[in-house]
Image: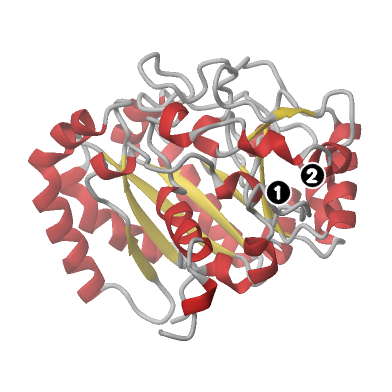
Amino acid sequence: MASKYSQLKIFHFQDKVDSLPKEVQEVKAPLHIRIKPTNVCNHNCWYCAYKVDNLQLGQDMVEKDFIPEAKMMEIIDDCIEMGVKAITFSGGGEPFVYQYMLQTAKKLANSPIAFASLTNGANLKGEVAEIFAKHAKWVRVSMDGWDDESYAQYRGTSKNAFSKVLQNMRDFKAYGGACALGVSFIIDQKNYQHVYEFIKLIKSTGANSIKLSGCVVDNEGAKNNAYHQPIYDEVKAQAKRAKAELEDASFEIYDTYHLLEDKFDKDYTWCPYSQVLPVIGADLNIYPCQDKAYNLENGLVGSIKEKRFKEFWFEDKSKFFKINPKIHCKNHCVSNHKNQMILDYLSVDNDHLGFV
């Protein structure tokens, strides 16, 4: 099975990688952009990093913010012109409560840009769901509860919300199309004993994959480890059993559940991925990554409130080097390993390349 989650994808774009260092004058378009169209969400998850007070992510988020329709269309036009390869919608809020998501999906469906979305699945229905099913590359539903009662407790929803999301997923697959439907199961101390049974349930909906991830409960890696350590072995055992019994050519189980301490401290002074996968927030600010979104003090690259995205992107390359990960990124970072690989690649002595 070809891997959808390889961290080596970036090296299929060698010209982009070679353009990243500050001393290279050329600025190339980002390969992938994460757009947060709205900060409004119809769920209230206890671990949501954009809402809890003890996590730096989202500390300056304004819930009422959203991208106006005309600005969204302008951004997509710019991305098409720039040659951006992919766009992913995420929160902030819930992408499928964004009032212009249908118009946005229709425009992307008629463009060369691959698109995808994270979602809680509650509004994954109707015409917009059909467009995603038939034209998007993937949709991933974030879940945590394992039945109606637990799901309602996790998210502050009605007691049948879990069943409705599962039905939305079945209906999504029934539309046909090549869009890969996945689930991200967020693991904590309440649901860890239900990993295997949940994976089995998700497979029965016709979903193509499930990703296992641990919830992040603190800005300090050691405190996250302390939270997950008591349940770690049980989760890994259930994941191993599920892979052996449930994974096949039509259903992938991607186990990213791990201890997080090594991902927090950084030993490098610039972030390559800020030029590869930036974030456009609902506030029309540009951030280097999803982990620094809505952090104005040490996560802001700039703003496109008064200018076009393409104009902003290609002017003044120094903006990509304002943030020093060694100083400003003591937080969890999903791109840390990718950054390390890129920096290792770029640091090779060209006189010794042949000695592989």
The residue depicted at 30 percent of the width and 25 percent of the height is 218
Please indicate whether residue 225 sits to the left or right of residue 142 in the image: left
- Judging from the image, what secondary structure is the residue with disc 2 in? helix
Q: Is residue 296 above or below residue 149?
A: above
The spot of residue 244 in percent (x, y) is: 21, 75
Q: Can residue 170 be seen in this view?
A: yes
Identify the disc placed on residue 112. Answer: none
The mark nearer the N terminus, 2 or 1, is 2
The foreground one among 129 and 139 is 139
Q: Quadrant of residue 73?
A: top right
Amino acid type, callout 1: Gly
Q: Is residue 86 above or below residue 216?
A: below
Please indicate whether residue 44 sits to the left or right of residue 226 in the image: right
For the C terminus, give its image quadrant: bottom left
The spot of residue 228 in percent (x, y) is: 17, 38
Amino acid type, callout 2: Leu
Q: In this view, does 194 lie above or below 68?
A: below
> What is the spatial separation of the Cα atoms under label 2 and label 1, in whole angstroms?
10 Å
- Judging from the image, what secondary structure is the residue with disc 1 in? helix
The residue depicted at 85 percent of the width and 55 percent of the height is 82
The foreground one among 35 and 146 is 35
Q: Which one is in front in this view, the residue at disc 2 or the one at disc 1? A: 2
Binning the other alpha carbons within 10 Å of mark 1 as few (below 14), some (14 to 19) or many (20 upward) gives few
Judging by the rendered image, the residue that carries numbered circle 1 is 126
Q: Is residue 207 visible?
A: no
Q: Is residue 236 above or below residue 266?
A: below
The foreground one among 254 and 26 is 26
The residue depicted at 90 percent of the width and 49 percent of the height is 77
Q: In which quarter of the image is residue 329?
A: top left
Identify the disc placed on residue 102. Answer: 2
The spot of residue 317 in percent (x, y) is: 74, 41
Please indicate whether residue 191 sits to the left or right of residue 352 in the image: left
